[in-house]
Image (tube, rainbow, N blue to C red):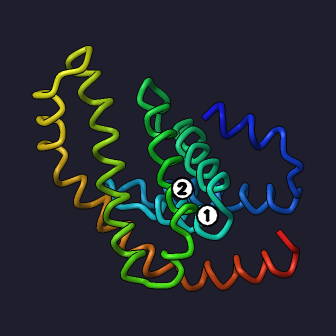
Amino acid sequence: MVLVLARLDKRKTNVRRIVLIAVMTALSIVSRFIFAAVPAFKPMAAIIILTGMYLGCEAGFMCGALTAFLSNFYFGQGPWTPFQMVAFGLVGVTAGLLASSLKKRRIVLVIYGIVAGIFYSFFMDIWTMLWAYSGLNLAGYIAAIATAVPYTVLYAASNVVFLLLLERPFGRRLGRIIHKYRI
């Protein structure tokens, strides 16, 4: 996370781009609040993916990391927060790296949504293993993955549903804003 922040700090960044990243982050945070009653089924990751796709790797990382950090002021900060920040940040970075493929074919976007949900769950299972066993333990990690299967399925399904719902309207608007303001 420090490397991304340092890189952003050294570059001359367009203020409009920063505002757009902040807006996408705010939308992601609000989406987590709105769907708080439904465990693991939230549009948060889809918005992070769209941010990475349309604004680039760094924006995707910042949106993901800041969403986890800032929304946890409401949902609860803890030693799991850095894991959430890195996991969502990597989801955004990867979406930025795969942007051209994700924009061209919806099936690739759907597959990425599924993979991102599984990745997030598996990454957070590292935290679960470290917490439960106070260290690295393969059997503990496998147990964490096994017990998290319902959540993993929900993460992947919510990513697919919200990506299919949000990609076209967000893509059109973000594309128009990026073109109009030369972001």
- Specify whether 105 is left or right of 37: right
- Quadrant housing residue 36: bottom left
| Mark sitting on residue 83 | none
Cα–Cα gap, marks 2 and 1: 7 Å
As rendered, which of 77 and 180 lies closer to the eye? Answer: 180
- Residue under pointer 2: 92
Q: Amino acid at mark 2?
A: Gly
Would you place residue 4 above or below residue 183 in this image?
A: above
Q: Quadrant of the C terminus?
A: bottom right
- Residue 37: image location, x then y, percent: 37, 55
Q: Quadrant of the N terminus?
A: top right
Mark 2 crowdedness (10 Å alpha carbons): few <14, some 14-19, many ≥20: many
Image spot of residue 32 (x, y percent): 49, 55
| Secondary structure under the numbered disc 2 in the rendered image | helix
Residue to which mark 1 is pinned: 51
The picture quadrant where one finds residue 110 is bottom left
**Residue at 88% in and 74% down:** 181
Q: As shown in the figure, which amino acid type bears the numbered disc 1?
A: Thr
Q: Quadrant of residue 147?
A: top left
| Residue 56 placement (x, y as % from top left) | 65, 61
Q: Is residue 91 left or right of residue 9?
A: left
Q: Is residue 124 above or below residue 80?
A: below
Q: Tell me whether circle 2 and circle 1 mark residues in contact (CB < 8 Å).
A: yes
Point 18% across, 32% down: residue: 141
Mark 1 is surrounded, within 10 Å at the Cα level, by few (under 14), some (14 to 19) or many (20 or more) other residues, namely many
